[in-house]
Amino acid sequence: MVAHAGYRLSYLANDKDDSVRREVAEQGHNLSNFIRDSSYLVRKAVAEQGYGLDILYKDKITDVRVAVARQKYRLDIMIDDKSPYVRAEVAKQGYGIDKLSNDNSKIVQRAIKDYKIKFV
């Protein structure tokens, strides 16, 4: 794909296809405009670049917030996220293991177990 190769990124940043815009974001181009993109896939790519985390940690889509937690941003807040997938990612980062040990989610408990196997 042209975006993946890094060509014509300014033009492709306005493409109607979210997969094209996602590729542009993955190249690190136009990130400030993509923070509020209509596609969660594009916003997730922005978070994966470590950009706009101060906004994206509040995103309504779980996958975007998981990507933010992977960047270790605001884990002090992400630990209380409504989604067990976000809390599990917090556990994978080794943050708040004591608190998360009381979490009722099997997803979170599995993440804690995996963390302890790797790092404890």
Image: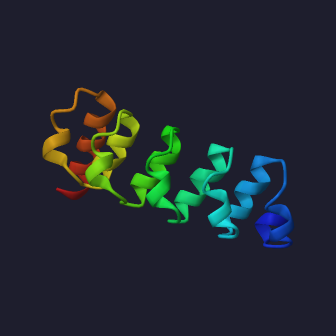
Question: How far across and down, in percent of the image, does residue 60 sit?
Answer: 51, 38
Q: Quadrant of the C terminus?
A: bottom left
Q: Is residue 29 above or below residue 36?
A: below
Question: How far across and down, in percent of the image, does residue 10 sit?
Answer: 81, 70
Residue 1 is at least partly visible in this image: no
Identify the residue shown where x is 84% and y is 48%.
16
Q: What is the count of numbered marks?
A: 0
The foreground one among 82 and 102 is 82
Identify the residue shown where x is 20% and y is 40%.
100
Residue 72 is at least partly visible in this image: yes
Q: Relative to 48, is 41 on the left or the right?
A: right
Identify the residue shown where x is 50% and y is 44%.
59
Question: How far across and down, in percent of the image, does residue 5 sit?
Answer: 80, 70
Q: Is residue 34 above or below residue 79?
A: below
The foreground one among 58 and 3 is 58
Q: Relative to 45, is 96 on the left or the right?
A: left
Question: How far across and down, in percent of the image, does residue 94 sit?
Answer: 24, 54
Q: Residue furthest left?
A: 98
Identify the residue shown where x is 32% and y is 41%.
87
The foreground one among 19 and 109 is 19
